[in-house]
Image (cartoon, helix red, strand yellow):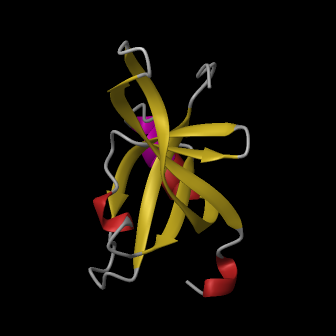
Amino acid sequence: MKTGDLKHRITIQQYVTGTNENGFPVDEWADFTTVWAAKRGLTGREYYAAVSVQSETDVVYTIRYSSTTATITTGMRIKEGTYINDIKSISDKDGSKRWFEIHASEVVNSGS
């Protein structure tokens, strides 16, 4: 992976529960961090492996490792422009703590 491959600006969001100015509970998606990412769809062997287990994963993002990105979880989502993707899995494929690979699936009619 080269730094020049990071062409997509994505925002990682987390679901937060809080209260508004009137003291009423509010549940909403809030920005966690914004990073540059490489993006690719599943191809060939990956696609057929995903289909065989009925996986919804359709996008793979690669981002730089940092202390912030190390705390990303599968309960979060990725917002890229008008597209929303639920995070399905996160891995440091070679264990070097340089790059994270995030598998995500598109959210349809997310309401946000």
Seen from the viewer's position, the closer of residues 8 and 33 is 33
Q: Residue at x 41, y 69 (%)?
A: 100
Q: In the rendered image of this protein, does residue 37 appear above or below residue 41?
A: below
Count of residue discs: 0
Seen from the viewer's position, the closer of residues 101 and 25 is 25
**What's drawn in magenta, residue-wise?**
48-52
Picture quarter with the N terminus: bottom right
Q: Main secondary structure of the magenta part?
A: helix
Left or right position of 78 against 32: right
Left or right position of 55 against 96: right
Q: Position of residue 109 (x, y in %)?
A: 63, 19
Q: Position of residue 32 (x, y in %)?
A: 45, 51
Asked if residue 59 can be seen in this view, the reply is yes
Seen from the viewer's position, the closer of residues 22 and 7 is 22
Q: Residue at x 43, y 64 (%)?
A: 101
Seen from the viewer's position, the closer of residues 45 and 101 is 101
Asked if residue 41 can be seen in this view, the reply is no
Q: In the rendered image of this protein, does residue 79 appear above or below residue 96?
A: above
Picture quarter with the C terminus: top right
Left or right position of 104 against 98: right
Q: What is the residue that sits farthest to the front in this orientation?
A: 22
Q: Position of residue 75 (x, y in %)?
A: 33, 39
Does the magenta segment cover residue 22? no
Q: In the rendered image of this protein, does residue 84 appear above or below residue 5?
A: above
Left or right position of 88 against 48: left
Q: Residue at x 43, y 36 (%)?
A: 55
